Image (cartoon, grey):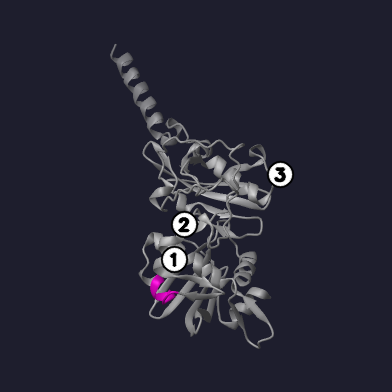
C-alpha cells in the first residue's frame, strides 16, 4: 500500500513538473491581432460626417486612392512583427501600405489612430490628420456604432458640415471643409505659404508644442522640407527627402522608418532612423541641423549641417552626402 501511495505521489509530482515547465503561451489562446484590428472602429476621416468606420474599411478606402483596381479581397494583411505588448500589422496592395500598431490592454486590443502610418504608392507619408480618403461608402460599410477603441475624436476636433459626400483629398483651399480640423492650429501657429512659414517663430512653436500640436507642426515642416536642399557648388542640389530615401536604400533595416523633430537652443534637428529589429538598435540614421532665415514674406528653413550613420559607420556634412550617394 505504501509503495502504491509513493508511486501515485511520484507520478503526480512528475506530471505537475512537466506541466509547470511548459511555456505559459501553450495554455493561452493566441491573439488573432489581424482579425481584431480589422473590426476596430474609429471616427471616419471623412470630415463631412461623424460616422464610425472600421479599420478594414479605412485601409481599403486609403488604398483605393492609390489603385482603383484594389478590392478588399486582394489586400494583403500580415503580422509584420511582434511588439512588447502587441503586434505591428501591415496591410498592403502593390506599393501602397498601412502600418498599424495593435497594443493589448487587458482583454482589449487598442489602436491609437494618430499612430497609424499611411504610405502611398509614391512613398509619401500620411497620418490620420491628412490621409487622402476616397469615399467608398457603397462598398465599405460605415456605421454609427460606438467604438470601444480610442476615438479619433480624442485627438482631432470633429467638424460637421452640410456639404455633400465627395472624395476626400489631402489638398485644401479656403473653401474646403477638409481644412477644418486644422483651423485651430492655423489660427494659433500660422501655416506655410509659398515654401515660407507665415505666422511666427516656427522653431519656437515646435519647442513649446504639446502632443497634438506637434503633428500639425510636423506637417508644416514636411511641406517646407520638400523644397529644402544642400549644395556645395550651386550646380548640384541634394534635396532632403531624396537624401533620406537614398540612405534608406543602403540601410540594413527591417522596420518602418521613424522620424522626429527636436529643438536645442535656436536650432531645429530633424532626425530619421531606420531601425533593425524590435529593439533600440538603429544602425542607420540621418540628422539635419536646421536654422531659420527671415524674409519679408515669412521664415524659411535652411540646413546648417548633416550627420548620418550607415550601418553603424558615422559620417558628417559632405562626407555624409558622398557616402549616401556613392
| Residue 313 visible in this rendered orientation of the protein | no
Q: Choose the circle earlier in sequence order: 1 or 2.
A: 2
Residue 4 percent location from the top left of the image: 33, 14
Q: Residues within 10 Å of mark 3 (few under 14, many from 20)?
A: few
Label 2 sits on residue: 180
Residue 18 percent location from the top left of the image: 41, 30
Real-space CA distance between mark 1 and mark 3, rounded to the nearest whole angstrom: 36 Å
Disc 1 + disc 2, Cβ < 8 Å: no
Q: Is residue 72 left or right of residue 85?
A: right
Secondary structure predominantly adopted by residues drawn in magenta:
helix
Label 3 sits on residue: 69
Q: Secondary structure at mark 3?
A: loop
Q: Quadrant of the C terminus?
A: bottom right
Q: Quick one: 326 or 62, which is closer to the camera? A: 62
**Which span is picked out in magenta?**
199-206
Residue for point 52% across, 42% down = 55
Q: Residues within 10 Å of mark 2 (few under 14, many from 20)?
A: some
Label 1 sits on residue: 186
Q: Secondary structure at mark 1?
A: helix
| Residue 119 visible in this rendered orientation of the protein | yes
Amino acid at each position: 500500500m505504501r509503495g502504491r501511495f509513493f508511486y501515485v505521489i511520484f507520478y503526480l509530482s512528475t506530471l505537475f513538473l512537466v506541466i509547470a515547465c511548459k511555456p505559459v503561451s501553450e495554455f493561452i489562446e493566441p491573439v488573432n491581432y489581424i482579425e481584431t484590428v480589422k473590426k476596430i472602429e474609429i471616427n471616419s476621416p471623412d470630415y463631412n460626417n461623424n460616422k464610425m468606420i472600421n479599420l478594414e474599411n479605412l485601409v481599403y478606402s486609403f488604398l483605393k486612392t492609390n489603385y482603383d483596381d484594389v478590392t478588399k479581397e486582394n489586400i494583403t494583411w500580415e503580422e509584420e512583427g511582434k511588439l512588447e505588448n502587441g503586434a505591428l500589422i501591415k496591410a498592403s496592395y502593390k506599393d501602397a501600405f498601412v502600418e498599424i500598431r495593435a497594443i493589448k490592454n487587458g482583454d482589449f486590443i487598442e489602436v491609437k489612430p494618430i499612430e497609424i502610418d499611411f504610405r502611398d504608392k509614391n512613398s509619401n507619408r500620411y497620418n490620420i490628420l491628412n490621409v487622402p480618403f476616397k469615399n467608398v461608402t457603397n462598398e465599405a460599410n460605415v456605421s454609427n456604432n460606438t467604438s470601444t477603441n480610442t476615438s479619433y475624436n480624442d485627438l482631432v476636433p470633429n467638424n460637421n458640415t452640410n456639404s455633400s459626400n465627395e472624395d476626400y483629398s489631402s489638398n485644401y483651399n479656403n473653401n474646403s471643409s477638409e481644412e477644418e480640423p486644422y483651423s485651430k492650429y492655423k489660427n494659433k501657429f500660422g501655416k506655410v505659404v509659398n515654401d515660407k512659414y507665415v505666422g511666427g517663430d516656427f522653431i519656437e512653436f515646435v519647442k513649446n508644442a504639446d502632443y497634438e500640436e506637434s503633428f500639425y507642426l510636423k506637417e508644416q515642416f514636411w511641406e517646407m522640407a520638400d523644397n529644402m536642399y544642400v549644395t556645395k557648388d550651386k550646380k548640384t542640389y541634394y534635396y532632403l527627402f531624396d537624401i533620406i530615401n537614398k540612405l534608406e536604400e543602403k540601410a540594413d533595416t527591417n522596420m518602418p522608418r521613424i522620424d522626429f523633430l527636436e529643438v536645442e537652443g535656436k536650432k531645429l534637428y530633424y532626425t530619421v532612423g531606420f531601425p533593425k529589429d524590435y529593439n533600440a538598435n538603429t544602425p542607420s540614421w540621418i540628422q539635419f541641423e536646421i536654422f531659420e532665415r527671415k524674409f519679408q514674406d515669412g521664415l524659411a528653413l535652411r540646413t546648417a549641417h548633416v550627420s548620418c550613420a550607415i550601418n553603424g559607420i558615422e559620417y558628417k556634412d559632405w562626407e555624409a552626402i558622398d557616402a549616401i550617394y556613392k
